[in-house]
Amino acid sequence: MNDIDSKKESRFWREVRSWVIIILIALGLKSTIVASYMVPTGSMENTIMTGDFLIGNKFLFGARTPDWIGIPYTRIGFNVPSFRLPAFTEPEQGDIIIFKFPRDEHLRYVKRCIAEPGQTVNIKRKKLYVDGNQFELPEHGKFERAQIIPSDYAQPGVFSTSPDNIDNYGPLYVPEKGDTLTVGETPKHILKNILKLSDHEYSVEEDYITVDGHRKQHYIVQQDYYFMMGDNRDNSFDSRYWGFVAADQILGKPLFVFMSWNKNMPLYRITKKIRWNRIGTVVH
């Protein structure tokens, strides 16, 4: 091999090494500091619109190393051990949060934190209360229907054992780390939800629970939980349906919209398909 070929080969591998380093840095940033998310539904309208692409801050609530490695946009992959760095702050009531959907952690949801650990949620005739104080509809939030579901109607699929519905709900206490949930005092659906989110092998019977093979009369909560709702309150699949979000499922906080598509506009009308007025919108 002559000197010219040797120099070309050396330049080639330097280029490859540079690109590998760039890709690793980008993946590191995406995994620990910032990430992009696409909003597929209208549950947060008009705060966040269907087709918005968001930049999210993953560092605020504690950056974490990847816990899954696989082919992007597929479910082909495997879980890996992960750890989380200390958080700068904790999620607060009113924050918009990005989190793993509790029923399918491959999915990412964006909702507003309505209640923090230790608070109580109650909805009466569409009016939302937390610890007895009314939680006003956010600036860009909305209701899609004027009708109110009767308080005695038990809506199918609602996270409750009472005759609750999304317009009349609770009161529901949001567990916090250190709480003791006692069999017979804590509703079964609460016990099941907390045990499932904590990745225990469990069963819930009438007068006892079995947790990882051990029969118990109570369970001490191991982490904080949150209650989430969409700003489009009549059209949001949220905690009223599927329960709590565990602290270790929280990923970050959306910062701004970096792109927005109008899904009803055909692609060939690209200049109209892009919602130019949404780009750069700060999410709050």
Image (tube, rainbow, N blue to C red):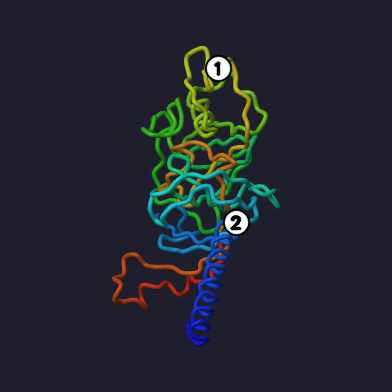
Q: Where is residue 180 in the image (x, y as percent from the top left)?
A: 64, 23
Residue at x 56%, y 50% (from the top left corner): 251
Considering depth in this image, is 143 or 92 the residue closer to the camera?
Answer: 92
Q: Which amino acid does label 2 sit on?
A: Thr
Q: Where is residue 237 in the image (x, y as percent from the top left)?
A: 42, 44
Q: Which amino acid does label 1 sit on?
A: His
Q: Which badge, 1 or 2, is on the more N-terminal residue?
A: 2
Q: Is mark 1 on a helix, strand or loop?
A: strand
Q: Position of residue 28 (x, y in %)?
A: 58, 60
Q: In which quarter of the image is residue 260?
A: bottom left
Considering depth in this image, is 140 or 265 the residue closer to the camera?
Answer: 265
Relative horizontal placement of residue 274, taking residue 80 as reference (left or right): left
Q: What element carries label 2?
A: helix
Considering depth in this image, is 63 or 55 the residue closer to the camera?
Answer: 63
Relative horizontal placement of residue 60, taking residue 261 as reference (left or right): right
Q: Where is residue 207 in the image (x, y as percent from the top left)?
A: 51, 12
Residue at x 60%, y 52% (from the top left corner): 95
Q: Quadrant of the C terminus?
A: bottom right
Considering depth in this image, is 50 or 7 the residue closer to the camera?
Answer: 7
| Cα–Cα span, label 1 and label 2 | 36 Å
Marker disc for residue 245:
none
Q: Are marks 1 and 2 in contact (CB under 8 Å)?
A: no
Relative horizontal placement of residue 175, taking residue 40 as reference (left or right): right
| Location of residue 176 with respect to 230 vertically, above or below | above
Q: Label 2 belongs to which residue?
A: 32
Q: Can the viewer see residue 284 in this picture? A: no
Q: Label 1 belongs to which residue?
A: 214
| Location of residue 163 with respect to 238 vertically, above or below | above
| Location of residue 36 with respect to 8 vertically, above or below | above
Count of marks, rendered view = 2
